[in-house]
Amino acid sequence: MKLTLSVIKADIGGYVGHSASHPKILDKAQECLKAAKKDGLLIDFHVTNCGDDVQLIMTHKKGEDSEAIHKLAWDTFVEGTKLAKKLRLHGAGQDLLSDAFSGNVKAMGPGVAEMEIEERQAETVIIFMADKTSAGAWNMPLYKMFADPFNTIGLVIAGNMHGGFSFELHDVKEHKKITFNAPEEIYDMLVFMGAPGRYAVKAVYHRGTGEVASVSSTQRLSKMAGRYVGKDDPVCIVRSQGNFPAVGEILEPFTMPALVEGWMRGSHHGPLMPVAQPQANPSRFDGPPRVISYGFQLADGKLVGPRDMFDDPAFDEPRRWANQAAEYLRRHGPFEPHRLPLEEMEYTTMPQVMKKLEKRFVNL
């Protein structure tokens, strides 16, 4: 069965501050998607949140970039924003960068990850959702899942994965893309993948079959808005089992809480902490960055789940490690490397400060 899995998210109001989403906002989103399912637009859906980002997980037969599906998401976020304004939530409608829908939400603020697939007999998917970080946060985990045999033993011993995967990277500043084949182009690929502030993995494909293995959101809010509007809080879909890594191989990269951009005012490096969904309420210095993981089995488009994959004591140590890293970084205060380098702060108040002081700089 051919179907499309769409994950579309937006920050439409924080409760309290940037820490969480208000239950009434999630109820409103549930109400909107329930009506769309009743009308036949959706096969199934699930609504959740990671921090202050509302997550719409939807299955349908409309294909990727469907105007009808994107408009449904947009209208849902608009209705949620109206309620957020009544509740006086912080940053109501923050990720909606336009007053009117224009056919696709990708250039309008919300983050989007979609894949059209032929549903397998047992279609296992893992959906990662993050808060207080940017699209490049998936680079290291995706590399480990699909290119690192020390993480994914299937690359070595599973004949259907031994041929490797291809990675589509997007230059989020120059709006270009490039594809690398692993394993033979790993060294070239890492030159770019290791710079997650600029290059983000958009998709991964099985080289033997051409099947899509993973898709992520790569929207840069600041580039679209021309000003600081928070970090991009990305989402990522990963297919599992069969021709793809096992569930445990997909989750394993998150046992190392990698440093990512984001945290307070989107201007700091912090550890990406894997948490169960109820713990995705970042509050210490508006962080540290969080990631949740929902697992589903698809059955004729129905979402069987979710299973909260990080709700496991095996991730207690990574969480402790993340807290230790957070403590160490916070002791740096406004100094790099906790604070992002100046070139990454062009959408904050930094340009205003530079303009104010430019006449006080003199040649050496």
Image (tube, grey):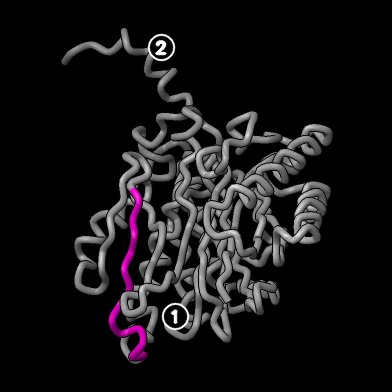
Point 36% across, 38% down: residue: 341
- Check residue 363 in the rendering and tell me which mark sits there, or answer none: none
- Mark 2 residue crowding within 10 angstroms, few (<14) / some (14–19) / many (20+): few
Q: Amino acid at mark 1?
A: Pro
Q: Is residue 306 visible from the viewing direction of this image?
A: yes
Point 48% across, 83% down: residue: 246
| Image location (x, y in percent) of residue 36 | 76, 55
* Residue ranking furthest to the top: 359
| Image location (x, y in percent) of residue 72 | 68, 48
Depth check: give the residue in front, 280 or 154. 154
What element does badge 2 sit on? Answer: helix
Depth check: give the residue in front, 360 or 54. 54
Point 66% across, 67% down: residue: 276
| Residue 168 shown in magenta | yes
Q: Amino acid at mark 2?
A: Lys
- The image quadrant where one finds the C terminus is top left
Q: Is residue 75 left or right of residue 174?
A: right
Q: Which residues are magenta?
A: 158-170
| Image location (x, y in percent) of residue 8 | 60, 53
Which residue is denoted by mark 2 in the rendering?
356
Which residue is denoted by mark 1 in the rendering?
245
What element does badge 1 sit on? Answer: loop
Q: Is residue 52 visible from the viewing direction of this image?
A: no
